[in-house]
């Protein structure tokens, strides 16, 4: 009987964990409104409930389902889109895919107003 209870509790915590939603905020490098669009678009995935990147603070806040994504995976999404985070770096090829105005590693600094006219 003892084992049965322990087993049920274990399963219950598994199921509860699987349903869990969490919010994570971390630094994502970028310089303009185009970066914002690109970053937020990259997080348009099943299991991501919301993604908001702030141009001023360069912080991304992601609401996600913990059974779908790990913290490392969330960082990797930004890196794959060409944007460095604290723990995931875009490869040279991924970074090269960015618009000239978005090359944050090379000191690109065009404002979001200038970029909006590009579209
Ligand atoms: Cu940009």
Image (spheres, helix red, strand yellow):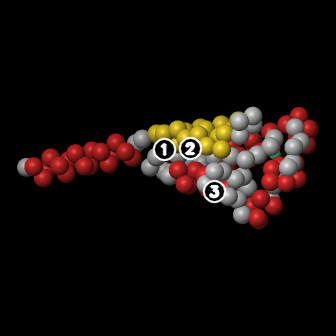
Badge 2: residue crowd in 10 Å (few <14, some 14–19, many ≥20): some
Q: Are marks 1 and 2 in contact (CB under 8 Å)?
A: yes
Q: CA distance from mark 3 to mark 2?
A: 18 Å
For label 2, the SS is strand
Q: Is mark 2 within 8 Å of ligand 1?
A: no
Neighbour class for label 3 at 10 Å: few (<14), some, many (≥20)?
A: some
Q: Nearer the viewer, residue 72 or 97?
A: 72
Q: Position of residue 35 (x, y in %)?
A: 77, 45
Mark 3 or mark 2: which comes first in sequence?
2
Q: Secondary structure at mark 3?
A: loop
Q: Residue at x 70, y 53 (%)?
A: 84
The relative height of residue 92 versus residue 16 in the rendered view (above or below) is below
- The answer to whether one can see residue 80 in this image is no
User: In the rendered image, which quarter is residue 40 located in?
Assistant: top right
Question: Which of marks 1 and 3 precedes in the sequence?
Answer: 1
Asked if residue 55 can be seen in this view, the reply is: yes
Q: Residue 90: percent from the left, percent from the top?
A: 70, 59
- Lower position in the chain sequence, tag 1 or tag 2: 2
Determine which residue is flagged by label 2. 48
Label 3 vs label 1: CA separation?
20 Å
User: Residue at image x 91%, y 38%?
Assistant: 114
Q: Is residue 62 left or right of residue 42?
A: left
Residue 89 to residue 17: above or below: below
Q: CA distance from mark 1 to mark 2?
A: 6 Å
The disc label shown at residue 96, or none: none
Q: Which mark is residue 65?
A: 1
Between circles 3 and 1, the one closer to the viewer is 3
Disc 1: CA contacts within 10 A as few (<14), some (14-19) or many (>=20): some
Q: Residue at x 85, y 49 (%)?
A: 107
SS at circle 1:
strand
Q: Is mark 1 within 8 Å of ligand 1?
A: no
Q: Which residue is mark 3?
A: 88
């Amino acid at each position: 009987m003892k084992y049965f209870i322990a087993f049920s509790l274990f399963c219950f915590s598994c199921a509860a964990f699987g349903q869990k939603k969490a919010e994570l905020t971390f630094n994502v490098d970028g310089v303009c409104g185009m970066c914002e669009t690109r970053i937020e678009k990259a997080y348009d995935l099943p299991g991501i409930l919301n993604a908001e990147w702030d141009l001023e603070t360069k912080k991304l806040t992601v609401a996600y389902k913990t059974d779908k994504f790990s913290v490392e995976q969330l960082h990797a999404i930004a890196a794959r889109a060409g944007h460095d985070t604290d723990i995931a770096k875009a490869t040279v090829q991924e970074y090269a895919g960015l618009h000239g105005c978005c090359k944050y590693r090379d000191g690109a600094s065009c404002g979001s107003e200038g970029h909006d006219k590009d579209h």
